[in-house]
Amino acid sequence: MRKMTSGSGLGDAYGATIDRIKAQGGDRPGLGMSALMCISHAERPLSADELCHAVAIELGSTNFNADNVPSMSTLLGCCQGLITVNKEASTVRLIHFTLQEYLSTSADIFSTPHSTMTEICLTYLNSEQIMAIPADSSPNIPNIPFLKHCFLYWGAHAKRELSDHARPLALQLLLECDGHISIKSFLEQSGYSWFLRTGRDLRFNGLHWASFFGVAELVAALIEMGCYDTDVEDFWGRTPLALAAENGHEEVVKILLERGEANPNKPDASGLAPISCAAMSGHGAVVKIFIGREDVNPHRRDNAGTIPITLAARRGHTEVVKILLAHQDVNPNKLDTWDATLLWDAAAGGNEGAAIILLGREEVNPDKPDGDGRTLLSHAAGNGHVGVIKILLGCQEINPNKPDNSGRTPFSHAAGAGDGEVVKILLGCPEINPEKSDNDGRTPLFYAAMGGSEEVVKMLLGCEKVNPNKLDNYSITALYFASGSKLERLMKMLRGREEVNPDQPTH
């Protein structure tokens, strides 16, 4: 399909407008082009205040001059109508998505945009004004609006492109980050606010930060400088290697293992080794690096007794499961600490791909129960994993009516969960007995009524085999469980069956 910016169309119009921007007098060309670069290459939309501060930064300067900050109206004029302010979102954007395409594909407009963005962010973070802010301060400082964007994204830009000008600025920040406001704020914004509330020692140094972002050149430089121990632990016991593995940074993982001689089996506070961090995050290429080493144990258990392949199966990372299965002989039927098999973890988590791979192995028993007597089909039915249910029902070894230790069948668990789609699928299986009672004499109708699912109750009442008057071991019916002000509709539905005894006791 022909691009909208090709030929003599929009591309020429955008080019002519940029020529007008560059032909303006004074500092207006610089402001206009800087604004376009920041908007088109930022990792997220910038607010008006963020953009105004970004274009005011003098690259490499140790002092941020607030007098250089232009007004938003000035920037709008400098950009000759190519940018606009989204008042609802309070962000600045390009006038059309085709302009983004034009700016991204025209290499002669911005030569090294991500490196320049790195310099902008690092100059701001290394400025005297930012360095003077106490480490435990909130990053939401009115007169420093660009702070949060800089500490969250400088590394993303540096990973894409790092110039000779940006490199020393990055090393300066990484070597002096102890006590910098960015560290606490970065961790807080990255999902670790729970730890910050504990008041424990906040350990997170420059090598941790560079490894987290995956900037290989900076990691290598820090190792060569001998500034940090490559196995130093952060606040959660994670090494730089674990952080790189968790975030899928292959080159950094190789550098830490080869040059830094990092310990590939060192666990964090949860007992997770770097290979587990990579497996649970779905980074197959990093997992391959680890299993290619003789000193890495691909079956190492964490504090919960879980091995890497199980972590991958639970989270739906089929490719990682395939990689680990191909590496060494793994017993898919072996029970973990929670009496569950690898196939059970895949099925219970709704991982269809992993389930198919595992079911293809001859030694796998798809009907093997866990410690509670629940089969894979039982867990999949109770959790609403339609795809896995269909796969399991296609296996000859599966008994769809197999009860667990409490006597409940997969269908009973599906009815109790109130999942109409799963109930419909199971009812379509001729082997399913919708009236099978558990150890307390309660049928799936009882559990559907308990859960308050009108849809499932209606479906069950439509089955000829279902007896709405059936008594459990305590001489009560499903109508009893459907009683109560919130379940009046269910009561009416149950009583709508001619054979229902209205004199049965209710709440």
Image (spheres, rainbow, N blue to C red):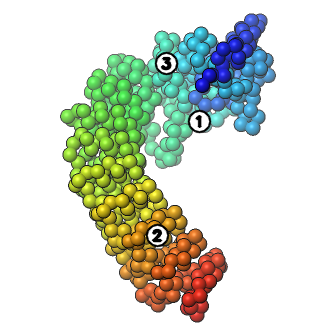
Relative to 323, say whether 215 is above or below.
above
Relative to 85, say whether 440 is above or below.
below
Seen from the viewer's position, the closer of residues 507 and 73 is: 507
Q: Quadrant of residue 104?
A: top right
Which quadrant does the N terminus fall into? top right
Which residue: 34% across, 71% down? Answer: 402
Q: CA distance from mark 1 to mark 3?
A: 30 Å
Which numbered circle lies on residue 427?
Answer: 2
First of labels 1, 2 by sequence position: 1
What amino acid is labelled 3 in the image?
Answer: Glu
First of labels 3, 2 by sequence position: 3
Q: Which residue is mark 1?
A: 137
**In this rendering, would 354 be left or right of 328?**
right
Residue 156, how many percent across, how many down? 51, 27
Which quadrant does the C terminus fall into? bottom right
What amino acid is labelled 1 in the image?
Answer: Ser
What amino acid is labelled 2 in the image?
Answer: Leu
Q: Which residue is mark 3?
A: 161
Which residue: 39% across, 74% down? Answer: 408
**Nearer the observer, disc 3 or disc 2?**
2
Residue 240, how many percent across, how many down? 37, 32
- Dot 1 falls on a residue whose secondary structure is loop
Q: Which residue, as the protein is rendered here, is positioned at the far bottom? A: 503
**Nearer the observer, disc 1 or disc 2?**
2
Q: CA distance from mark 1 to mark 2?
A: 59 Å
Seen from the viewer's position, the closer of residues 48 and 202 is: 48
- Asked if the residues shown at circle 1 and circle 3 are in contact, with their CB atoms under 8 angstroms apart, the answer is no
Binning the other alpha carbons within 10 Å of mark 1 as few (below 14), some (14 to 19) or many (20 upward) gives few
- Asked if the residues shown at circle 1 and circle 2 are in contact, with their CB atoms under 8 angstroms apart, the answer is no
Residue 430, how many percent across, how many down? 41, 71
- Dot 2 falls on a residue whose secondary structure is helix
Which residue: 46% across, 69% down? Answer: 427
